[in-house]
Image: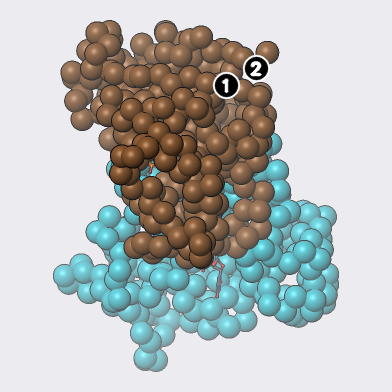
Chain colours: A cyan, B brown
Amino acid sequence: MAKDQAFVTLATNDNYARGAMVLGRSLRNHNTTRQLVVMIGTQVSQPSKEVLEKIFDEVRLVDVLDSGDTAHLALMKRPDLGITFTKLHCWALTHYSKCVFMDADTLVLQNIDELFDREELSAAPDPGWPDCFNSGVFVFKPSNETYGRLLEYCAEHGSFDGGDQGVLNGYFSNWATADISKHLPFIYNLSSIAIYTYLPAFKQYGGNAKVVHFLGETKPWSYTFDPTTQMVSGDVKEAPTQHSFLLDWWTLYSASVVPLLAEEYGDQAFDSGC
Amino acid sequence: MAKDQAFVTLATNDNYARGAMVLGRSLRNHNTTRQLVVMIGTQVSQPSKEVLEKIFDEVRLVDVLDSGDTAHLALMKRPDLGITFTKLHCWALTHYSKCVFMDADTLVLQNIDELFDREELSAAPDPGWPDCFNSGVFVFKPSNETYGRLLEYCAEHGSFDGGDQGVLNGYFSNWATADISKHLPFIYNLSSIAIYTYLPAFKQYGGNAKVVHFLGETKPWSYTFDPTTQMVSGDVKEAPTQHSFLLDWWTLYSASVVPLLAEEYGDQAFDSGC
Ligand SMILES: O=c1ccn([C@@H]2O[C@H](COP(=O)(O)OP(=O)(O)O)[C@@H](O)[C@H]2O)c(=O)[nH]1
Ligand SMILES: O=c1ccn([C@@H]2O[C@H](COP(=O)(O)OP(=O)(O)O)[C@@H](O)[C@H]2O)c(=O)[nH]1
Ligand SMILES: [Mn+2]
Ligand SMILES: [Mn+2]
């Protein structure tokens, strides 16, 4: 039953690949029964790819430039939207009947397999402009037809924010007004940002968080971590509440991902960040 | 028909009273067919009260401490929630069949009478924690029964954020998941904050704004204004986009409210802020 449903993420380089590894491990640790798929770009190194293969059921090289299809044509019109086109490629995974896309900068805190009860396009509101959904976590149905339409839309209208969120909100434009069941609770895509903008709400509801999303410029892998003292450091501007999620990320990364990376890199030097 | 429906706001002091005056004028300028009601506290000065009476159909003194009813009892249990109890008093306006509450720090940019097509409790999402509604604009149905229950809820559970928004979200707790028609589009309660958190979305959708809400510590009346140069000044931390809304507020205030205040204050000195 669950074989034709998958969690899907994307990593176009080794940094985001680390995020994907942690995300994949967090899904496994919470006993998902679904398949795990990571789409990777050509810049992902061989050792990273090997580690991803240990964690994910399917590692799929997505080279939009090479695809020779509508995606390639769309990309030629809008070369600025390269990674956006790569993300949209998830609709081409038609060997699955339903999927949940998750950004590589998300971390799962509880089993979230119930998301597969939802229909396309289900997503949580974006704090900041809450009539838009945040495209870091969404339920979708792979379909070549939808894929083609999305690419067309994207090539024609571009993206109002320069990324996939703008495109997807433009295409699925009735999300805010049509169907409440397509509004995922915010705890399925809790932006670390929301902690500061409305701390009392975070204190009230944040304890039930299922997915934390480290959106914005500073990603968990932008920091460094000392496993002995269990301290995250770097140019940390964030307040202590985010730190507990950040610590969760680094704890999982250092314990479950770094050993796999060390094995693959062997004698080659690599910077684990901790 | 429209006589039994009203826009309702609240001002417990002369500063918020200025906000209420501007709000009232903005509703009139956009040709509302509904009644305008302002609930005031005992601290509002006589001249302010006179001006409010020129703009609003009903100026209603709300003295929760004096009310001798359940509100008073509730307040004795939670003295910290004084203004919150005052706001909840809007449910006691049972001579109206339906109302739209609007914070005194909101400004209407287009006719919004269509809000009366919505049912209780309709409100727009709060940026920051978008599974909560923002309580700066909401549709409600006055009812002594609801009023009593709200006060009870408030006295028993308090407010998770110390204000009315926490109480109302606790009481109307299925807003996020139950009925999409109770989700007002964000442009009916566009927080000035949202401009910075997601500027591309503001550029895409902000042109349709119907109500701007100056939420947060700095209110329009915290600034000063030079009518000659049309410049707002003060400790202005905000970027230029908010300035156009702020300028709208001050333009309306200086042109339509200050003359009324000047008339009422007569020889008495008063600080108009411009
Ligand atoms: O250089 C990049 C940028 C983005 N992504 C993928 O696209 C997602 C969205 O980008 P990001 O999370 O950086 O955006 P944000 O959530 O901060 O808006 C990432 O999580 C990755 O899955 C990627 O693989 N490489
Ligand atoms: O001292 C006060 C504080 C608040 N209010 C009323 O309560 C509303 C909510 O407070 P505020 O707008 O300051 O909160 P924010 O929207 O910034 O969270 C105001 O707009 C006023 O209508 C008031 O009359 N006096
Ligand atoms: Mn992200
Ligand atoms: Mn307000």
Q: Does residue A188 lie above or below B84 as drawn?
A: below
Q: Which one is nearer the viewer's eye here, B228 or A90?
A: B228
Which residue does the image show at 57% across and 75% down from the upper left?
Answer: A12
Residue extending furthest toward the bottom: A268
Three-letter code, disc 1: Gln
Residue holding disc 2: B2
**Do residues under tags 2 and 1 come within 8 Å of each other at their CB atoms?**
yes
Q: Is residue B169 visible?
A: no
Q: Which one is nearer the viewer's eye here, B245 or A204?
A: B245
Which residue does the image show at 59% across and 13% down from the upper left?
Answer: B4
Residue A75 image position (x, y, % from top left): 76, 75
| Left or right placement of residue B111 versus residue B70 in this view | right
- When asked about the image quadrant of residue A81, the answer is bottom right
Does the beta carbon at disc 1 come under 8 Å from ligand 2?
Answer: no
Which residue does the image show at 53% across and 78% down from the upper left?
Answer: A13
Residue B35: mark in rendering:
1
